[in-house]
Amino acid sequence: MPKEVTDGAVWGDRRITLQELEAARQTVRLCSGLSRQELAQTICEHWGWVTASGSHKVTACLKVLEEWEHQGLLRLPGKRRMTRWSTDQACGAVPTQRTNPGAPLVGALSEVGPVRLEVVQGRDASQLWNEYVDRYHYLGYRQPVGCFLRYFIQSPAGWLGCVLMAGAAKAVRARDQWIGWNRPRRQQNLPWVINNTRLLIFPWIRIGHLGSHVLGQLARRVGTDWQQRWGYEPLLMESFVDPVQFPGTCYQAAGWIELGRTTGRGLLRAGSVYESTPKIIYVKALAEDVRERLCGGALQGRAEP
């Protein structure tokens, strides 16, 4: 008898949320060029599913994927040997001529016509967005997990850049203190905080104040877009800016609040810590009394994809 698919059901030795299930299904759809083994490896990386020694539980993950396929939840590729394709290539981030640099565009914001954010929809547009980000953002492209929205920055002169909104960081001391969260309340209401994980202005675009203008539009419309796509309206945006790369001027100009810096240390999984450059922490409220609402009782809405 097929196992019932519920939020937090145990598969193998792991409790898997419906959000993780949908993220895995999307990885299988988008990364159709990967083998089953490579898909399991990728999903283990996204989930942080590892053994006590830190290696990925690829075999256990593959068994779960095959059980989901048996239940009709997803369709895996045919069994074959591992390929040499990278995850980014198979996910559609291979550079092509369509993302070659455009003609330089220099001037004032008023000279390029109305600038607007366009939600990315469909496989072709998503792969094009992936390719631009992988090619021109210093962090490259990585398949987002869980709820997310991609945007193109559009104008009559063409596309000017890309924006990604995704799930919030699980725990950030300065942010959590600013909100007033304890651990149980954070775990309960974290989905109502979303992260601006990518803000890319193409390197051939030199338009004054474009970044802050885009962030202003984002604050005005992301709540509605998120509601339409995921069924609930977020209350707070966050972003982490590497001061080695950018001073964060556009966030300041758009009215984001600087909360301090990250420690530069993060937990990949139990017993495994990574070091990075401390990032500047910015937040932007999307509603009034946002801290009171995030610290109140359980927020209502569909908080999983």
Image (cartoon, rainbow, N blue to C red):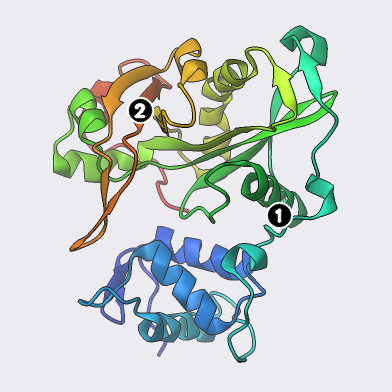
Q: Position of residue 68 (x, y in %)?
A: 48, 80
| Mark identifier at residue 285 | none
Q: Position of residue 184 (x, y in %)?
A: 16, 44
Q: Tell me which residue sits at (65%, 18%) in the image.
A: 210
Q: Tell me which residue sits at (67%, 74%) in the image.
A: 33
On the image, which quarter does residue 236 sit in?
A: top left
How crowded pointer 1 is (Cα within 10 Å; few <14, some 14-19, many 20+) is rated as: some
Q: Amino acid at mark 1?
A: Gln
In this view, the residue in front, 221 or 265, is 265
Q: Position of residue 165 (x, y in %)?
A: 51, 39
Q: Tell me which residue sits at (29%, 73%) in the image.
A: 50
Element type at mark 2: strand
How crowded pointer 2 is (Cα within 10 Å; few <14, some 14-19, many 20+) is rated as: some
On the image, which quarter does residue 54 sit in?
A: bottom left
In this view, the residue in front, 36 or 219, is 36
| Mark identifier at residue 127 | 1
Q: Are marks 2 and 1 in contact (CB under 8 Å)?
A: no
Element type at mark 1: helix
Taking 178 as reference, is 221 left or right?
right
Can residue 73 be seen in this snapshot? yes
Q: Position of residue 6 (x, y in %)?
A: 36, 68
On the image, which quarter does residue 91 sit in?
A: bottom right
Marks 2, 1: nearer the viewer: 2
Task: Work out whether 80 lies above or below 189.
Answer: below
Distance Cα–Cα, label 2 vs label 1 = 30 Å
Q: Which quadrant of the rendered structure holds the N terminus?
A: bottom left
Q: Amino acid at mark 2?
A: Ile
Q: Tell me which residue sits at (54%, 29%) in the image.
A: 222
* Residue occupied by mark 2: 280
